[in-house]
Amino acid sequence: MKALFTALAVLTIGILAIPYAANFSAVEATEPPEDVPAPPDDESIVPSNPSKDVYFGELHIHTAYSFDSYIFGNPVGPDGAYRFAKGEPVSLYGGETKQLKNPLDFVAVTDHAEFLGELQLCTTPGSAAFESEMCQQMRANNMSAFSRLAMSVTARKRVEEVCGANGEDCAAIAGDLWTRTRNNANRHYEPGKFTTLVGYEFSQNTPTAQFSDFTNKTRSDVPGMLHRNVIFRSDHVPEKAFSAYDGNGEELHKWLETNCIDDCQVLTIPHNSNYSWGRFFWSDKNSDGSAWTKDILERRARVEPLVEIFQIKGSSECMAGVGLTDEECGFENTVAACPPGEEDACASADSFVRTALVRGLEVERTLGVNPFKYGFVAATDTHNGNPGGTVEDTYNGHLGQQDFSAGKRMGYSQKIGSGGRREKSGKFAYLMFNPGGLTGAWAERNTRGAIWDALNSRETYGTSGTRIRVRFFGSFDYPSDLHRSKDLVEQAYASGVPMGGDLRAAKGSKAPRFVVWAARDPDSAPLQKIQIIKGWVENGINKSRTFDAVCSDGIKPDTRTGLCADNGARADLASCAYQLDKGAGELTTTWSDPTFDPERRAVYYVRVLENPTCRYSTWDALRLGVAPDDKWSPTVKERAWTSPIWYAPAVH
Amino acid sequence: MDIAHLVCPGGALMKARMPARLCSLLREPLVQFLALGVLIFTVDALINPSAPTADRNIEVTGQDLSRIRTAYVQQWGSPPSDAEISALLDTFVRSEILFREGSALGLADGDSVIRNRVIQKMEFLLRDPSAVSEPTEAELVEYLSNHADRFSLPATLRVEQLYFSLSARPESAEADASRALVRLREGSKPTDEGDPLMLPPLSEFQSEQAIAKAYGSSFAQTLFKLDNNDWNGPIRSVTGLHLVRILDRQTERMPALQEIRGQVHDAIMATRMTAQNTAAYERLAANYDVSFSPGVRDGADSAKSAR
């Protein structure tokens, strides 16, 4: 009998104690938080550069304050996340201490608003909910707690055993962690050096998402995401973080406009449209199927200037073969293309940003408002509390226990089989994900106001994880060799618009000129080309075309196709060395649209491509001594996507 | 009997002033419960001098290891790595010690749920913010001087440049730059020469690391090795060739305490909290004799030495 008791005790300990000691201190649930003020950041303290500099950062990180991150065993809280972003060494899940080679300039820690109260109650000994089965499961890293919570979001009813009959216990205490979120941001904000933006993630599921046991019965059961990050300009924020329990995306926008006023300013950024089953960008209705109203569209256009075009869970720019033929769209696509007639649990044209950009032109023409007028950012969505950990050869996974080692990511066990090789574990492999991206923001200074203003005016771009620098300007008044002028930037701003801006209406039929410039990341491969992608609507059909504006190695675009031949650069798959004798450190040109029609709306954005480098999965395979998995390309071309420049004709 | 009532402000036994944190701690039912437990235990020990104390020998056997592994596989669906096993064994020992200590205080009755609760309570008790004191002025000064490398500000410089892009003039950049250098050294200002410099111009003070982020580390190193304020170059960056003239330098320096008071304070407090927690656990663990059956620790040890 005693032996049985001991056995049970050890089993329970084995499950319970490991993560508990690790996570518990990260949530710091003791006395109610006092306010930590923000440091001053006015002009006298941090001077401006009117030509602007680019600042690198990201706006999508989960720490142990996020329920799912906690369950995955992540020991890093917001404090650790900020220190990692600043370049300090931090111990991540698995015990490894990691450090960014180059610190980030700005960061927003964006934990899920939905479960702040639940997390607080489940980690405070003595709270009413502490002993509940849900809380015990959470502390035991039990995935069924995760499923139950996710289902409760879809149902918009909080788990009663934790939150009380009407969810009031969780709602009441969520403010504590929300205040701590704000305080953590204030504590780490160093104006001029490191900007922290207060924010959170609003995590709504598609309306029919089912999470029970992850065995979905029909396509519409498979959970899709309608997630948005909410980013504030300062630490003047509403009392609570409006979550998916409180309403849907349209209601979020309305609530924010009503409750974030005076010296509070806010914007929202949707992400993972590739997992939205098309709903984010439907052409004539809201994501829940209800009808558009002018009110809803105009509000969306005011509050939502950006989309997160790339992150760990894949690229949402476009997908090869889904509505277009651009072969560079076959990049980090994680969702299978939809069979004809389907939209759920797959990716249709509606799932992608390029579609939305073009669709927005038509909505603007017919309804007078463009709800899809999106600038771009990119991020990780790491659940390990390590912002900016996007370098392919030091990737640590993003889901704590699930994918922190090469073996786990590739689906290999520790066991060496009879052939002297590692054996497959038969477990789900995480190779479809990637290390994530970064945001570049052109701003006059590194302060909250300036960075947020850059986001709000869309003077931003996303990268697939490297620090490519890129400038993009457009105007009808640029000379054809503006890219050779030593005062290029001053001229470009003075007589044109930067990325994210609007061209004025054409006078006559002369086409606008765009000046582009890009420089390689010193720690990554040389650049292969700068492309300009144009979108427009013709006879009611969405169209897009990719032009190679300028290419490396003296290669010129073909006059007919507008595309360059391949420069032949390769990465060595045995060593992952990349070529330095092909590609350019810097590319620049002034480009004019050969198909410009002054009567037709158009949208233009830049895509910069590097020479090929090893994907992290190839690095993992090398380290494990196994063959790379042939489902994924062994190399990638890292890239950047700038916010678009829009053109609209004069209203007649 | 409410201990807090007696010794905190307003209480009958209030002789000395109690710090507020200690008082709020004393009001915590858990603390009172444990204090009561200690009282009972002490009285019991005095009355029954032969009453059992916590068994201070812990042997971690192959069976324990096997159960830990099984629990892990049940939880995560695949076996733990060597590094994870090492961490699990450490946690197993820690949990066992805390549980025995809690049991000795009379808190457990063998039920596994209660056992876990005891361990959690002990973990909570180990973290005692009130036992960690704020640093004095002298301590701040001392910490700063002992950790100079952590707080020192790196050397910076600012420059004037003329730039020749390897993309704009792949064949002639070297020659064009060298010619321009001659003219610059002669004192002329060839403002019409060179290409647009789109990287940060470095006209404001920048450190070597900051410059390397855009220009590459070889350029940054070369720049910081220059020992004169004349025109130098061409120095190669990731985009092209640069002629540079250093305008101004700042040597590496230690900031004054008032500039970084908050950072030094936070660093000390973080160290103290960790030390307090470690010391509290080790005080308990010191009384225990922990051994591992042969073979139990082998895989785990090789993981530790491999790190």
Image (tube, rainbow, N blue to C red):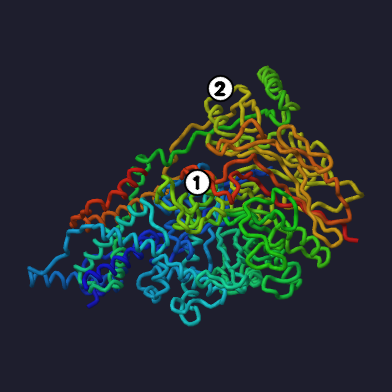
User: Which label sits on residue B228?
Assistant: 2
Look at the image and tell me whether residue B28 can be seen. yes
Image point 73% across, 37% down: which residue?
A551
Q: Residues within 10 Å of mark 2 (few under 14, many from 20)?
A: few
Position of A253 relative to A23 (above/below): below
In terms of depth relative to the viewer, which is nearer, A10 or B191?
A10
Identify the residue under disc 1. Answer: A620
Position of A223 relative to A402 (above/below): below
Q: Residues within 10 Å of mark 1 (few under 14, many from 20)?
A: many
Q: Quadrant of residue A362?
A: bottom right
Q: Position of residue B61 (x, y in %)?
A: 24, 58
Look at the image and tell me whether residue A41 can be seen. no
Quadrant where the N terminus of chain A is found in the figure? bottom left
Q: Amino acid at mark 1?
A: Asp
Q: Quadrant of residue B120?
A: bottom left
Image point 65% across, 36% down: which residue?
A569
Letter of the chain that mark 2 sits on in the rendering: B
> What is the secondary structure assignment of the residue under circle 1?
helix
Mark count: 2
In terms of depth relative to the viewer, which is nearer, A565 or A480?
A565
Letter of the chain that mark 1 sits on in the rendering: A
> What is the secondary structure assignment of the residue under circle 2?
loop
Q: Amino acid at mark 2?
A: Asn
Position of B81 relative to A33 (above/below): above
Residue projecting furthest to the bottom: A165
Quadrant where the C terminus of chain A is found in the figure? bottom right
Q: Is residue A540 left or right of residue B295?
A: right
